[in-house]
Amino acid sequence: MLWLDSDITYTQVPGWLGNTTRDLKLSVIRHFQTNDDTRYPVIFWFAGGGWMDTDHNVHLPNLVDFARHGYIVVGVEYRDSNKVQFPGQLEDAKAAIRYIRANAERFQADPNRFVAMGESAGGHMASMLGVTNGLKQFDKGFNLEYSSNIQAAVPFYGVVDPLTAKEGSISNDFDFVYRNLLGAEPEDAPELDSAANPLSYVNSNTVPFLILHGTEDVVVPIKDSECLYEKLVKNEVPAELYEINGASHMDVKFMQPEVFKIVLTFLEKHLN
Protein backbone atom coordinates (compact mmCIF):
# COMPACT_ATOMS: atom_id res chain seq x y z
CA MET A 1 0.00 0.00 0.00
CA LEU A 2 1.19 3.51 -0.84
CA TRP A 3 0.59 6.86 0.79
CA LEU A 4 0.75 10.33 -0.79
CA ASP A 5 1.94 13.25 1.30
CA SER A 6 1.15 16.23 -0.90
CA ASP A 7 2.54 19.74 -1.02
CA ILE A 8 4.84 19.66 1.99
CA THR A 9 6.87 22.82 2.58
CA TYR A 10 10.55 21.91 2.43
CA THR A 11 12.10 25.39 2.46
CA GLN A 12 11.26 29.07 2.25
CA VAL A 13 12.68 31.54 -0.26
CA PRO A 14 12.17 35.22 -1.09
CA GLY A 15 8.73 35.86 -2.55
CA TRP A 16 7.09 38.79 -4.33
CA LEU A 17 9.80 41.24 -5.45
CA GLY A 18 11.97 39.91 -2.65
CA ASN A 19 9.70 41.52 -0.07
CA THR A 20 7.77 38.46 1.09
CA THR A 21 8.48 34.83 1.94
CA ARG A 22 7.42 31.99 -0.32
CA ASP A 23 7.11 28.31 0.50
CA LEU A 24 8.52 25.68 -1.84
CA LYS A 25 6.68 22.37 -1.86
CA LEU A 26 7.31 18.73 -2.48
CA SER A 27 5.04 15.68 -2.65
CA VAL A 28 6.03 12.22 -1.45
CA ILE A 29 4.77 8.82 -2.57
CA ARG A 30 5.81 6.51 0.27
CA HIS A 31 5.01 3.09 1.64
CA PHE A 32 2.49 1.98 4.21
CA GLN A 33 3.89 2.70 7.65
CA THR A 34 4.88 -0.46 9.53
CA ASN A 35 6.50 -1.06 12.87
CA ASP A 36 9.79 -2.28 11.42
CA ASP A 37 12.85 -0.27 10.42
CA THR A 38 12.50 -0.74 6.66
CA ARG A 39 14.08 2.08 4.69
CA TYR A 40 13.60 2.67 0.98
CA PRO A 41 15.72 4.34 -1.70
CA VAL A 42 14.42 7.72 -2.83
CA ILE A 43 13.89 9.08 -6.34
CA PHE A 44 13.74 12.87 -6.50
CA TRP A 45 11.82 13.88 -9.61
CA PHE A 46 12.29 17.27 -11.29
CA ALA A 47 9.74 18.15 -13.95
CA GLY A 48 10.67 20.13 -17.04
CA GLY A 49 9.21 23.32 -18.43
CA GLY A 50 12.17 25.28 -19.74
CA TRP A 51 12.81 26.71 -16.26
CA MET A 52 9.77 28.86 -17.05
CA ASP A 53 6.89 26.85 -15.61
CA THR A 54 6.79 23.57 -13.75
CA ASP A 55 4.46 21.40 -11.71
CA HIS A 56 6.03 19.04 -9.19
CA ASN A 57 2.90 16.85 -9.12
CA VAL A 58 2.18 16.52 -12.83
CA HIS A 59 4.28 13.36 -13.44
CA LEU A 60 3.59 11.55 -10.19
CA PRO A 61 0.93 9.23 -11.70
CA ASN A 62 3.53 8.04 -14.22
CA LEU A 63 6.09 7.40 -11.48
CA VAL A 64 3.95 5.22 -9.23
CA ASP A 65 5.51 2.11 -10.78
CA PHE A 66 8.83 3.07 -9.18
CA ALA A 67 7.12 3.22 -5.78
CA ARG A 68 5.56 -0.18 -6.41
CA HIS A 69 9.06 -1.52 -7.01
CA GLY A 70 10.26 -0.36 -3.61
CA TYR A 71 11.18 3.29 -4.05
CA ILE A 72 9.97 6.49 -2.44
CA VAL A 73 9.19 9.11 -5.09
CA VAL A 74 9.53 12.81 -4.29
CA GLY A 75 8.20 15.42 -6.72
CA VAL A 76 10.11 18.66 -6.10
CA GLU A 77 8.98 22.21 -6.81
CA TYR A 78 11.80 24.57 -7.73
CA ARG A 79 11.77 28.24 -8.65
CA ASP A 80 11.45 29.14 -12.30
CA SER A 81 13.66 31.65 -14.08
CA ASN A 82 11.06 34.41 -13.72
CA LYS A 83 11.79 34.29 -9.99
CA VAL A 84 15.48 33.43 -9.77
CA GLN A 85 18.33 32.83 -12.18
CA PHE A 86 20.77 29.95 -11.98
CA PRO A 87 22.02 28.62 -9.55
CA GLY A 88 18.80 29.30 -7.61
CA GLN A 89 17.15 26.20 -9.08
CA LEU A 90 20.06 23.99 -8.01
CA GLU A 91 20.00 25.53 -4.53
CA ASP A 92 16.30 24.63 -4.28
CA ALA A 93 16.94 21.05 -5.38
CA LYS A 94 19.69 20.59 -2.82
CA ALA A 95 17.44 22.05 -0.12
CA ALA A 96 14.81 19.40 -0.95
CA ILE A 97 17.39 16.63 -0.68
CA ARG A 98 18.59 17.93 2.69
CA TYR A 99 14.99 18.13 3.92
CA ILE A 100 14.26 14.50 3.11
CA ARG A 101 17.58 13.41 4.61
CA ALA A 102 16.79 15.39 7.79
CA ASN A 103 13.37 13.71 7.94
CA ALA A 104 14.48 10.28 6.75
CA GLU A 105 12.79 8.42 9.59
CA ARG A 106 9.46 10.18 8.98
CA PHE A 107 9.48 9.23 5.31
CA GLN A 108 11.12 5.77 5.68
CA ALA A 109 13.96 7.03 3.50
CA ASP A 110 17.38 5.43 3.19
CA PRO A 111 19.70 8.48 3.21
CA ASN A 112 22.45 6.47 1.51
CA ARG A 113 20.38 5.75 -1.61
CA PHE A 114 19.18 9.02 -3.12
CA VAL A 115 18.57 9.38 -6.88
CA ALA A 116 18.05 12.56 -8.92
CA MET A 117 15.83 12.07 -11.95
CA GLY A 118 14.18 14.60 -14.26
CA GLU A 119 13.18 15.56 -17.78
CA SER A 120 14.43 18.38 -20.00
CA ALA A 121 15.13 21.35 -17.67
CA GLY A 122 14.57 18.87 -14.84
CA GLY A 123 17.09 16.59 -16.53
CA HIS A 124 19.57 19.44 -16.36
CA MET A 125 18.80 19.61 -12.64
CA ALA A 126 19.43 15.87 -12.23
CA SER A 127 22.75 16.19 -14.05
CA MET A 128 23.84 19.19 -11.99
CA LEU A 129 23.04 17.29 -8.80
CA GLY A 130 25.03 14.33 -10.08
CA VAL A 131 28.21 16.35 -10.58
CA THR A 132 28.14 18.69 -7.56
CA ASN A 133 28.39 16.35 -4.57
CA GLY A 134 30.44 18.08 -1.89
CA LEU A 135 30.31 21.57 -3.46
CA LYS A 136 29.03 23.60 -0.53
CA GLN A 137 28.54 26.83 -2.49
CA PHE A 138 25.22 25.47 -3.71
CA ASP A 139 23.92 24.62 -0.22
CA LYS A 140 21.70 27.48 0.92
CA GLY A 141 18.85 27.76 3.40
CA PHE A 142 17.75 25.20 5.96
CA ASN A 143 19.05 21.82 7.23
CA LEU A 144 22.62 22.74 6.36
CA GLU A 145 23.94 20.20 8.86
CA TYR A 146 22.73 17.49 6.44
CA SER A 147 24.33 16.51 3.14
CA SER A 148 22.76 17.27 -0.23
CA ASN A 149 24.74 14.48 -1.91
CA ILE A 150 23.02 11.94 -4.13
CA GLN A 151 24.12 8.49 -5.24
CA ALA A 152 22.88 8.29 -8.86
CA ALA A 153 21.55 10.56 -11.62
CA VAL A 154 19.02 9.76 -14.36
CA PRO A 155 18.45 12.67 -16.78
CA PHE A 156 15.74 12.24 -19.43
CA TYR A 157 16.62 14.31 -22.55
CA GLY A 158 18.24 16.87 -20.24
CA VAL A 159 19.92 20.09 -21.22
CA VAL A 160 23.67 19.91 -20.65
CA ASP A 161 25.49 22.99 -21.98
CA PRO A 162 23.00 25.89 -22.43
CA LEU A 163 25.07 27.25 -25.32
CA THR A 164 25.26 24.04 -27.34
CA ALA A 165 21.64 23.25 -26.52
CA LYS A 166 20.62 26.61 -27.95
CA GLU A 167 22.87 26.35 -31.01
CA GLY A 168 22.07 22.71 -31.70
CA SER A 169 18.30 22.92 -31.37
CA ILE A 170 16.47 22.45 -34.66
CA SER A 171 13.59 24.44 -33.21
CA ASN A 172 14.47 27.99 -32.10
CA ASP A 173 11.12 28.55 -30.42
CA PHE A 174 12.69 28.09 -27.00
CA ASP A 175 15.99 29.94 -27.39
CA PHE A 176 14.84 32.59 -24.92
CA VAL A 177 14.77 30.11 -22.01
CA TYR A 178 18.56 30.06 -21.81
CA ARG A 179 18.76 33.85 -21.60
CA ASN A 180 16.14 33.81 -18.86
CA LEU A 181 18.00 31.09 -16.92
CA LEU A 182 21.43 32.72 -17.07
CA GLY A 183 20.46 36.40 -17.18
CA ALA A 184 22.31 36.76 -20.50
CA GLU A 185 22.62 35.04 -23.84
CA PRO A 186 24.92 32.03 -23.32
CA GLU A 187 27.13 33.04 -26.26
CA ASP A 188 27.68 36.43 -24.63
CA ALA A 189 28.36 35.15 -21.12
CA PRO A 190 30.78 32.19 -21.19
CA GLU A 191 31.32 32.28 -17.42
CA LEU A 192 27.59 32.05 -16.72
CA ASP A 193 27.22 29.33 -19.32
CA SER A 194 30.08 27.33 -17.83
CA ALA A 195 28.63 27.66 -14.33
CA ALA A 196 25.37 26.07 -15.50
CA ASN A 197 27.08 23.32 -17.51
CA PRO A 198 27.40 19.90 -15.81
CA LEU A 199 30.49 19.19 -17.95
CA SER A 200 32.33 21.84 -15.90
CA TYR A 201 32.02 19.84 -12.69
CA VAL A 202 32.68 16.19 -13.57
CA ASN A 203 35.16 14.87 -11.01
CA SER A 204 35.93 11.94 -8.72
CA ASN A 205 32.74 12.62 -6.70
CA THR A 206 30.49 12.39 -9.75
CA VAL A 207 27.83 9.71 -9.34
CA PRO A 208 26.83 6.99 -11.81
CA PHE A 209 24.68 8.30 -14.68
CA LEU A 210 21.92 6.77 -16.76
CA ILE A 211 21.19 9.11 -19.68
CA LEU A 212 18.10 8.77 -21.89
CA HIS A 213 17.45 10.79 -25.05
CA GLY A 214 15.26 10.53 -28.13
CA THR A 215 16.73 10.38 -31.63
CA GLU A 216 14.05 12.78 -32.96
CA ASP A 217 14.42 15.47 -30.28
CA VAL A 218 14.35 18.89 -31.99
CA VAL A 219 14.30 20.90 -28.73
CA VAL A 220 17.35 19.57 -26.86
CA PRO A 221 19.94 18.09 -29.24
CA ILE A 222 20.86 14.48 -28.59
CA LYS A 223 24.49 15.54 -29.06
CA ASP A 224 24.31 17.16 -25.63
CA SER A 225 23.64 13.81 -23.98
CA GLU A 226 26.34 12.15 -26.07
CA CYS A 227 28.87 14.77 -24.94
CA LEU A 228 27.91 14.23 -21.32
CA TYR A 229 28.27 10.47 -21.70
CA GLU A 230 31.68 10.85 -23.35
CA LYS A 231 32.92 13.18 -20.59
CA LEU A 232 31.78 10.77 -17.90
CA VAL A 233 33.42 7.77 -19.55
CA LYS A 234 36.64 9.72 -20.09
CA ASN A 235 36.70 10.45 -16.35
CA GLU A 236 35.96 6.80 -15.50
CA VAL A 237 32.52 7.57 -14.09
CA PRO A 238 30.03 4.69 -14.52
CA ALA A 239 27.63 5.81 -17.25
CA GLU A 240 25.06 4.39 -19.62
CA LEU A 241 23.42 6.14 -22.58
CA TYR A 242 20.19 4.92 -24.17
CA GLU A 243 19.04 6.61 -27.36
CA ILE A 244 15.32 5.92 -27.82
CA ASN A 245 14.75 5.40 -31.53
CA GLY A 246 12.07 7.69 -32.96
CA ALA A 247 11.37 9.47 -29.68
CA SER A 248 10.87 13.22 -29.64
CA HIS A 249 11.10 15.66 -26.76
CA MET A 250 8.75 14.80 -23.87
CA ASP A 251 7.64 11.75 -25.80
CA VAL A 252 5.32 9.19 -24.19
CA LYS A 253 7.88 6.56 -25.22
CA PHE A 254 9.93 7.52 -22.16
CA MET A 255 7.13 6.45 -19.84
CA GLN A 256 6.86 2.92 -21.20
CA PRO A 257 7.54 -0.22 -19.12
CA GLU A 258 10.64 -1.04 -21.17
CA VAL A 259 12.25 2.26 -20.18
CA PHE A 260 11.26 1.83 -16.54
CA LYS A 261 12.93 -1.59 -16.59
CA ILE A 262 16.15 -0.03 -17.88
CA VAL A 263 16.04 2.53 -15.06
CA LEU A 264 15.28 -0.06 -12.38
CA THR A 265 18.09 -2.34 -13.57
CA PHE A 266 20.55 0.55 -13.51
CA LEU A 267 19.49 1.65 -10.01
CA GLU A 268 19.62 -1.88 -8.65
CA LYS A 269 23.18 -2.18 -9.95
CA HIS A 270 24.45 1.10 -8.49
CA LEU A 271 22.46 1.54 -5.27
CA ASN A 272 23.01 -1.89 -3.78
Image (cartoon, rainbow, N blue to C red):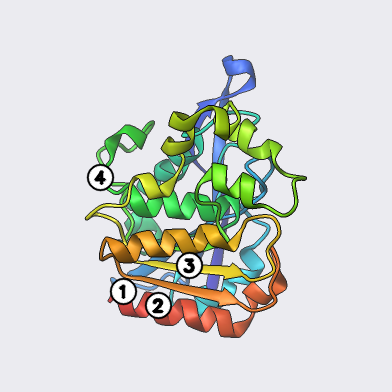
The numbered mark, 4 or 1, whose residue comes first in the sequence reads 4
Q: Amino acid at mark 2?
A: Phe
CA gap between label 1 and label 2 equals: 6 Å
Quarter assignment of residue 200: top left
Labelled pair 3, 1 in contact (Cβ < 8 Å): no
Give the residue pinned by disc 2: 266
- Where does the image place residue 138, in percent across and percent down from the top left? 36, 36
Could you say which is closer to the camera, residue 45 or residue 166? 166
Q: Amino acid at mark 4?
A: Gly
Give the residue pinned by disc 4: 134
Q: Residue furthest left?
A: 204
CA gap between label 3 and label 2 equals: 11 Å
Secondary element under disc 1, as helix, strand or loop, is: helix
Above or below — where is 31 with respect to 81?
A: below
Give the residue pinned by disc 1: 270
Secondary element under disc 3, as helix, strand or loop, is: strand
Q: Amino acid at mark 1?
A: His
Give the residue pinned by disc 3: 211
Instruction: Give neighbour class at mark 4: few <14, some 14-19, many 20+ (Cα, 10 Å).
Output: some
Could you say which is closer to the camera, residue 248 or residue 26? 248
CA gap between label 4 and label 1 equals: 19 Å
Above or below — where is 122 with respect to 137?
A: below
Q: Which marked residue is nearer to the observer: mark 3 or mark 1?
A: 3
CA gap between label 2 and label 4 equals: 23 Å
Q: Amino acid at mark 3?
A: Ile
